[in-house]
Image: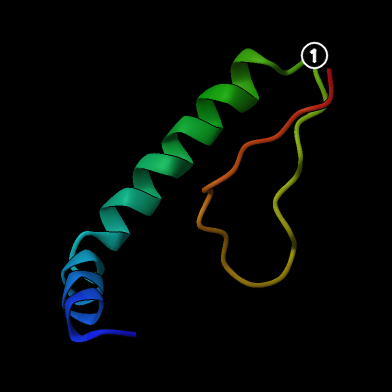
Amino acid sequence: MSNVVAGIDRGQLKVLDGRIAKNKEIYEVYKEDFKDIEIMNICDFGDSNYRLSACTI
């Protein structure tokens, strides 16, 4: 990893919690709006970053 990429990544860590919270908010909206469609569940272990919301259509 270059110094430039490392610097960018360190900056991103400052806003990480906010982005995860926003992703969770979006997931909850999808979960409610598409309750009749199977949405991929969150694992029972670890912490999700809610980066991907997938469903079976």
Percent of width and height locating residue 31: 64, 27
Please indicate whether residue 32 sits to the left or right of residue 20 in the image. right
Which residue is pictured at 17% across the width and 77% down the height?
4
Give the residue furthest to the front. Answer: 2
Which residue is pictured at 75% across the width and 31% down the height?
39
Q: Is residue 25 above or below residue 41?
A: above
Q: Amino acid at mark 1?
A: Asp
Q: Nearer the viewer, residue 42 or 16?
A: 16
Which residue is pictured at 74% across the width and 63% down the height?
44
Percent of width and height locating residue 28: 54, 32
Q: Is residue 35 above or below residue 55?
A: above
The N terminus sits in image quarter: bottom left
Residue 23, picture quadrant: top left
SS for tag 1? loop
Please indicate whether residue 17 sits to the left or right of residue 54 in the image. left
Question: Circle 1 sits on which residue?
Answer: 36
> Mark 1, residues whose alpha carbon is within 10 Å: few (<14), some, or many (≥20)?
few
Q: Is residue 4 above or below residue 57?
A: below
Q: Is residue 3 above or below residue 36?
A: below
Residue 47, picture quadrant: bottom right
